[in-house]
Amino acid sequence: MNEVYRLIAEKLPEMSRAQRKIAKYVLNNPEAVPFFTVGKLAKMAGVSEATVVRFATFLGFSGYPEWQQAMQESMKRQLTTVERLKISEEVYDSEDKSIFEMFQEDIERIKAMSVQIDMDLFYQAVQYITDAKRIFIIANRSAVSLGLFLEFYFDILFENAELIRNPHGISEKLFRLNKDDVVIGLSFARYTKSTIEAVAFAKDRGAKIIVITDHLLSPLVSYGDVTLCAPTEMPSFIDSFVAPLSLVNALITEVGRRKRSEVEKHLSDLEEIWERFHIFYE
């Protein structure tokens, strides 16, 4: 039994009735619970959310996020998509109810991110981006969706952004990197090997590295000058990118605010071009 689950088992004699309900559910579902929000675990165990938070501190953790991270680390491996699909079938018991629950859980993920985010690191990332000579965004597989979004807006604002999504040809794209450039690496469990290798290469070249990932256990963290975390875990075969997208929105908005005069001139020129080529429906 992994350490965090052994701790729960050892403390069983000291637990109240409500705590025993949580312990029993966690021990019976060790691969599903690390992906639960506080609300989801409370519902599945049949207790209040406050009881779940108190249970985490009873175990010796600072709160639910730290306990959840310990459970994820104790898994020692990342679940396959098939395993996660099976978990979703166990967690969501009816179609209509499951859709509503997913909406609520996404709201909780954004709230959790807003509470935990280090604003000094956020503003440091903004400074790196505004000062950068070139911006390279590295993302693969499902994270490409976020990378494309970043590239689209940064390219509109500065015309110096490029998304690198194909592991082949990365060396040709990145070999001129230097300390004046910034690289934004995006990856979430299960982490893409080519993204990690590309970010590591960029670090060796002296570029500033901004990491956007799901938590501090991510293999990308060791390469980041700045790491920004947004939770993505959900009991399904897909990841929830609601929180990371909200984080990306905040980055783009703050960068635009910092460079307001330049951005206004640039957007004004673009509006004339968009009108000439009838880009938007009238």
Image (cartoon, grey):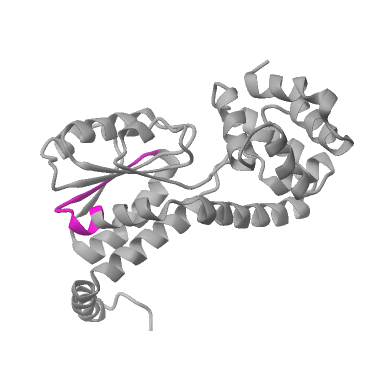
Q: Position of residue 185 (x, y in %)?
A: 33, 42
Observer able to see residue 167: no
Screen quadrant of the N terminus? top right
Residue drawn at x 48%, y 47% is: 230
User: Is residue 147 shown left or right of residue 217?
Assistant: left
Residue drawn at x 34%, y 31% is: 222
Residue 134 falls inside the magenta stretch: yes
Q: Position of residue 172 (x, y in %)?
A: 14, 35
Screen quadrant of the C terminus? bottom left
Q: Position of residue 272 (x, y in %)?
A: 21, 81
Q: Range of the magenta residues?
A: 128-140
Q: Position of residue 121 (x, y in %)?
A: 36, 50
- Residue furthest to the bottom in view is 282
In this view, the residue in front, 193 or 276, is: 193
Indicate the quadrant where residue 19 lies.
top right
Q: Is residue 264 above or below residue 239?
A: below
